[in-house]
Every structure is written in C-alpha cells, then in structure tokens.
Amino acid sequence: MKKQDYLKWDEYFMGIALLSTERSKDPSTSVGACIVSEDNKILSVGYNGMPIGCSDDEFPWEREGSNLDTKYFYVCHAEFNAILNYTGIYMKGAKLYTTLFPCNECTKAIIQKGITEVIYMSDKYAETDAVIAAKRMMDAAKVKYRQYTPIGKDITISL
C-alpha cells in the first residue's frame, strides 16, 4: 500500500515558495514565489530582493522615509523575480504560488506572461490600492486567484 500522507501539489509548491522566502534579506517582509506549468513542473522560483549588481548592503531596506531612502524603489518582488528568472519561452496556462498576494505591478507581468491562476498564502495588504488594482486586473483578464489553506503539517529541513 502506498504512503498516504504525501504532499499534494498545492502543499508542495507553496512549500517551495515558503522555502524561497528564506533567501530574502528583507528584514520586514520576506516573500517567495513558485511558477508551475499546467502539468505540475516547476518553471521558476523567486524571492524579493535587490536587482543583480545592486548591493543589498548599500541599498536601503527601510520602510519609512523619503522614497529614495526606502526599499520600495529598489526591491524586485518575488513574483517579478520568478518571471524574470524563467529561461524558457512559454508560460501560458501556468500557475503562480506566492506567499503574499501580488501587487499591481507584478500582476501586469503575470497577465502578460499568460499565467492563469494565482495561489497566495497571505493577503495582508488587501485594502491597499495596489492589491485592489491587482484584483481588478486579474478579474478583467480572467486570472483566477485563491487563498491557500494550510494543512497544518510541519516539515523540518535540517541543513
């Protein structure tokens, strides 16, 4: 008889997104994303961080202050990085697993690449204009989105 407590696809891919958050150096919000093909193959992963060549020791991680002194003008979001990290040419029909609901800017890229479903863990910025706009665009473009429901299983990875 086969093992019964194996991870289902949602748990597996959200687990990859969660593990990816551990690469982020953002002290306040670590986000991870995993893009998966229609046949459940991992296409790409990403996490929020500075662009290549922009030292995360020199650019700001602050959340408050003038625009040029906060992280917001510099950090690449996890979903955007996952899209940019993809080396293939075809993403149509893919699903995106992310630990935080995408902003309006990432949503533009999600739609343009042909991703048809977003599975997210947290929607803590649901009341912000960026997320309201993202949902409007997803609805218009018929991109499905749904919140991931944790199964309450702990997995320990020892390194």
Image: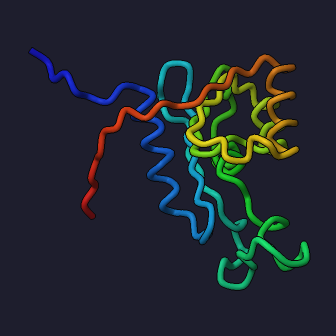
Give the percent coordinates (x, y) of residue 99.
Answer: 57, 45
Position of the N terminus by quadrant: top left
Q: Specify how the rendered protein is coloured.
A: rainbow
**Direction left: furthest residue:** 1
> Could you say which quadrant of the image residue 150 lies in?
top left
Give the percent coordinates (x, y) of residue 28.
Answer: 62, 67
Residue 38, above or below 36: above
Residue 71, above or below 116: below
**Direction front: furthest residue:** 127
Image position of 70 (left or right of 67):
left
Give the percent coordinates (x, y) of residue 124.
Answer: 67, 46
Residue situated in front as seen by the camera: 89 or 137: 137
Image position of 12 (left or right of 99):
left
Residue situated in front as seen by the camera: 81 or 154: 154
- Count all numbered tags in the image, as a single digit: 0
Residue situated in front as seen by the camera: 141 or 35: 141
Give the percent coordinates (x, y) of residue 149.
Answer: 48, 30
Which residue lies at the image location 55% right of the left edge and 36% below the top edge?
A: 43
Image position of 87 (left or right of 59):
left
**Direction bottom: furthest residue:** 58
Which residue lies at the image location 66% right of the left edge and 77% below the top edge?
A: 56
Which residue lies at the image location 88% right of the left edge and 44% below the top edge?
A: 129
Residue 117, above or below 151: above
Residue 87, above or below 78: above
Position of the C terminus by quadrant: bottom left
> Could you say which quadrant of the image residue 141 lies in?
top right
Which residue lies at the image location 19% right of the left edge and 21% below the top edge?
A: 4
